[in-house]
Image (cartoon, helix red, strand yellow):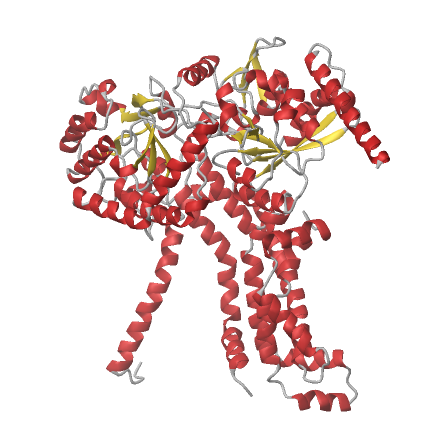
Amino acid sequence: MIRNKKAGAGVSLLLVTSILAGGCSSKSEADPTPSASTKDFVTISWYMRKPVDNMKDQEAVEAEANKIIKEKINANLKFNLIDVASWEDKMKVMSAAGESYDLVLTSSWTNRLDLNVQKGAFLPLDDLLKIYGQDIMKKVDPRAWKAVTFNGKIMGVPAQSPYSQPTAYVFKKDLVDKYQFDYKKVKTIQDLEPFLETIKKNEPGIIPLLAVGGAFMPGLLSFDYNSVTNGVMYDEKNDKVVLFYDVAENMNNYRTLNGYYKKGYVAKDASIKTDWIAEAKSGKYAVQRDSGGYTEDGSKSTGLLGFPTAEALLGYPMIQTGSMTGGVTAISKTSKNPERAMMLLNLVWKDKTLSNTLAYGVEGKNYTVKNGKGTDNPTVEANSGAAQTWAIWHNWLGPLWDQWDSNWNSTKALETMKKNNDTAKTSRLLGFIFNPDPVKTEVAQVNAVFAEANPILSTGSMPDFDKYIEEFKQKLKNAGIDKLRDEVQKQIDEWKKQNP
Amino acid sequence: MNRNLSPGKTLIHLFLAALCVACLYPFLVILGTSFQSQSDILKHGYSIVPKAFTLTTYRMIMHDPGVLIHTYGVTIATTVIGTAIGLWVTTSYAFAISRKDYAYRSPLAFFVFFSMLFHGGMVATYIMMVKWLGLKNSMLALILPYLISGWFVLLMKGFLQTLPEALFESAKIDGAGELYIFIRIVIPLSKPSLATLALFLSLQYWNDWWLTLLYSDRESLMTLQYLLIRVLKNMEFLNSSEAIQYGLVKEGMEVPTLGARMAMCVMAAGPMLVVFPLFQKYFVRGLTVGSVKG
């Protein structure tokens, strides 16, 4: 017993000293001498979804980056880039099988953060961040920490990205010019009517409005409502849970869309089409959604669609949990060197050259410096198109605002994004994640009803709107939407108590 | 010509011809569409005769012919090796449990039967393959898992049981050992069912992409089907707004996802369409022989 106690004391003493040592070393920024824990040379594996298929220069880029990493933290970084086709499944079996790896890309839309946390695949990062992640703490938007906190523990490092992507209507420029339509005044779906009518009358080859089965169409829902789960929404203005069909102004917008459909502004077979961008690119439509992000001159959607466009901004959606967790880096529970993994991550956030090397590649091979060579802030031209063989998205790596001025993202564009982030409204429910387990059956049934109704709703293609909505409501009621709402309300109430 | 074509027969012939056309039609649509450009498909829909004949889809898929040829090589190699070894393993196992004079007959049969009903699931398999056997990124990982399957063993056993026991006894009297009996008597006698089994096995290996997904990160072990899936997923990604944002696709460039889907279908199915008719006659016989008792 005595022996054990002694041993315990020794261990805790060791822990304290190592923590102290770590704390000291990260505070003294100017001094890059590795702390005690970086004595052994280790390899950190980082699993990431392959951003570009053709990543031929991976070894060269890693070698270049590892020069910095070895010098600073005595480690070696190895990217495991898994292509889109197998990424999701592979990560699932890997964590289920308990295979050891260190860093991994996770998010709200790929290799989902919340599901991984539920399975216990990740390490809580609070302590590691405090000791080794000071530079990360400085740069991450404080609101974003909320979105990655589960049961009071930080489970991932949220990357910087445009958290609130604007939504807009895109017009074919030649048609807007031809009919002198004041597109900038468009603020709602109703404002489109005069233009759609003109097009229908005068342009036989053109379908006035692009709608596609099941795909989001701007102007149908207001920015004040966030969807918690299918059918249940959160009214941000009045701070309460409402049902999808009880939001009068939105139902009104759907009714308008149905009117458009009946007047022939929407393609007759819209509900069976699925590929929004492919349809938009065909150039058959006068008005469509903006798929890239609003730019005042329409240059973004022109680039995407391939014909001159004009854009009307509808607004910026509220920042929600999902939009803040587009790219999060987590440390696996199976990691053998969690401290070093955090140090590496911190270095990526701290060291501009390192993060840009990982994103742009090797100078002269994957990018060239246009001007400002040798300075901290050069303007670079990265390989693009087929010539590009290396690129990891900055918003998967972490820091975005540190990016060098380049032909992908100009400083101005980055500043605009940052300003949008800083000024955008934030949802009251930031960090809340609905747990569907207690109402699994209801969720599945409601989802089934929506799967069936979405193509009709999003294209307005029902013969009788009121009758259809009545039936839709009844189906949702039968599926148990009231029980679902009560559960959402209950969970939000509990969550609010803990997160006032 | 003057073979008696009664109205009834004519009707049957016409009906069969129509059936043939109905079966061929979808494939012709696939073939035709694969030569269409994305915008033509969007404007005019799928059709057998392309409005403007184009090879962009094929060019896109084969942008790196080296990789494609390599994946064909991997697929053919796994198919041939897997089928050959799989045939031997399955047949010998089935032969053993089909012999009434074999002591461990029922435990071994139960083993097969049990594994058909219950299996460890994906994770257990993965742990065994990767951690215990250390087969990640190895060619064996693409071959081993399909070598033997309970269903094929039982199929084969069903056939082998129809061979008369007396045959083996007389062979033994003439001084033949078990291996000799198996190679010189059983295998030649079971040609039709072996051909059937070979077809099943080779189809399984040919169509597989799942094993590549799970057990291999290496480009050099990529199979054809996996490459095709990857190309398709990449094309879908190239059509997204992120791809434009990061300069992967030049402005206004067309990525022919719709046509490519069809072109891939042609490329993946093509070789099998040639192989299948060769097996066909055995296929029918093999199954019949297998299911007729005595």
Question: Is residue A264 shown left or right of residue A151?
Answer: left
Whether residue A408 is visible to the viewer of this picture, yes or no, is no
Identify the image quadrant of the N terminus of chain A: top right
Point 45% across, 22% down: residue: A162
Point 41% across, 32% down: residue: A493
Point 67% across, 21% down: residue: A132
Identify whether B144 is placed above or below B171: above
The answer to which image quadrant residue A301 occupies is: top left
**Outermost residue toward the left in this view:** A201
Question: Is residue A143 shown left or right of residue B25?
Answer: right
Identify whether B288 is placed above or below A249: below
A473 and A268: which is toward the camera:
A473
Identify the image quadrant of the C terminus of chain A: top left
At which x and y percent is residue A333?
65, 37
Whether residue A172 is visible to the viewer of this picture, yes or no, is yes
A33 and B6: which is toward the camera:
A33
Identify whether A53 is placed above or below A189: below
The answer to which image quadrant residue A163 occupies is: top left
A389 and A357: which is toward the camera:
A357
B141 and B74: which is toward the camera:
B141
